[in-house]
Image (cartoon, rainbow, N blue to C red):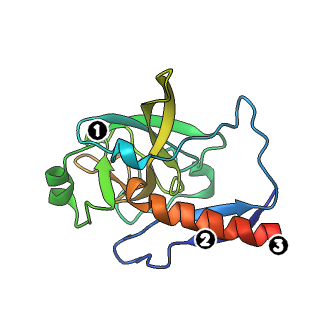
């Protein structure tokens, strides 16, 4: 299985990570199994689930050691298995105190103690929260954010920054529809 196409947001700004979101189109469907599962997209009627003081879980294959600002990971630093960690979503005020960012499309999360964090190589990984769905009120994992950037990782008084998924629901649905229609014609 390979990536057939990368669909990056046309207004992505690498200087401030604004609109840091992309979709990957695979050359064949994924086979779901116990170790390969899906996460749900947020629903418009749910509103944004990236809420201050709530906890979520981030995943990735990134560096497994703390990195100072500007320090790069080495090949041996990257995890060979998918890792996860749970963090508290921090307030907009705390996030702004530590960095300039657009809170409409981003949030920050972490413990601020330098204990656990997402890191170099985790970018694009999901930050999920549980939400009740359906008439049976079952819990599902919802992708509320995507790992975007940080000033180093696992550093005291620093947090990871995440792209909010909720503001991009229309963009995601439009791109999926457009690219699925192209596949139907091929």
At 52% from the left edge and 58% from the top edge, which residue is drawn? 73
**Circle 2: is it few (<14), some (14-19), or many (20+) Cα within 10 Å?**
some
> Where does the C terminus fall, quadrant-wise?
bottom right
Q: Eyeballing the image, is 30 above or below 183?
A: above
Query: Residues at badges 1 and 3 in contact (C-beta under 8 Å)?
Result: no
Count the marks.
Answer: 3
Residue 129: which quarter of the image?
Answer: top left
Q: Nearer the viewer, residue 19 or 84?
A: 19
Query: Residues at badges 2 and 3 in contact (C-beta under 8 Å)?
Result: no
Q: Can you give x and y, in whole percent of width and height, for residue 105 in the image?
A: 33, 61
Q: Sequence order check: which comes first, mark 2 or mark 3?
A: 2
Q: Which residue is mark 3?
A: 185
Q: CA distance from mark 1 to mark 3?
A: 49 Å
Q: Which residue is mark 2?
A: 7
Q: Eyeballing the image, is 32 above or below 95?
A: above
Q: Secondary structure at mark 1?
A: loop
Residue 51: which quarter of the image?
Answer: top left
Q: Nearer the viewer, mark 2 or mark 3?
A: 3
Q: Sequence order check: which comes first, mark 1 or mark 2?
A: 2
Q: Eyeballing the image, is 87 above or below 91?
A: above
Q: Sequence order check: which comes first, mark 1 or mark 3?
A: 1
Q: Can you give x and y, in whole percent of width and height, for residue 181 in the image?
A: 72, 68
- Residue 33 as seen in the image, left or right of residue 129: right
At 23% from the left edge and 36% from the top edge, which residue is drawn? 53
Q: Can you give x and y, in whole percent of width and height, for residue 134 in the image?
A: 50, 29
At 64% from the left edge and 64% from the top edge, which residue is drawn? 177
Q: Which residue is mark 1?
A: 111
């Amino acid at each position: 299985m390979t990536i057939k196409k990368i669909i990056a947001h046309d207004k992505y700004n690498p200087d401030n990570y604004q609109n840091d979101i992309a979709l990957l189109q695979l050359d064949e469907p994924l086979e779901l199994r116990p170790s390969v599962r899906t996460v749900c997209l947020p629903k418009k009627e749910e509103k944004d689930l990236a809420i201050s003081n709530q906890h979520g879980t981030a995943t990735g294959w990134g560096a497994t050691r703390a990195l100072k600002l500007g320090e790069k990971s080495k090949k041996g630093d990257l995890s060979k298995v998918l890792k996860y960690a749970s963090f508290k979503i921090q307030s907009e005020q705390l996030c702004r105190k530590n960095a300039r960012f657009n809170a409409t499309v981003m949030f920050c999360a972490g413990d601020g103690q330098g204990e656990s964090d997402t890191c170099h190589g985790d970018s694009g990984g999901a930050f999920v929260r549980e939400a009740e769905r359906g008439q049976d009120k079952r819990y599902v994992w919802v992708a509320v954010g995507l790992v975007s950037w940080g000033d180093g990782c696992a550093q005291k008084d620093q947090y990871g920054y995440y792209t909010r998924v909720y503001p991009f629901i229309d963009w995601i649905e439009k791109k999926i529809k457009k690219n699925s229609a192209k596949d139907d014609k091929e």
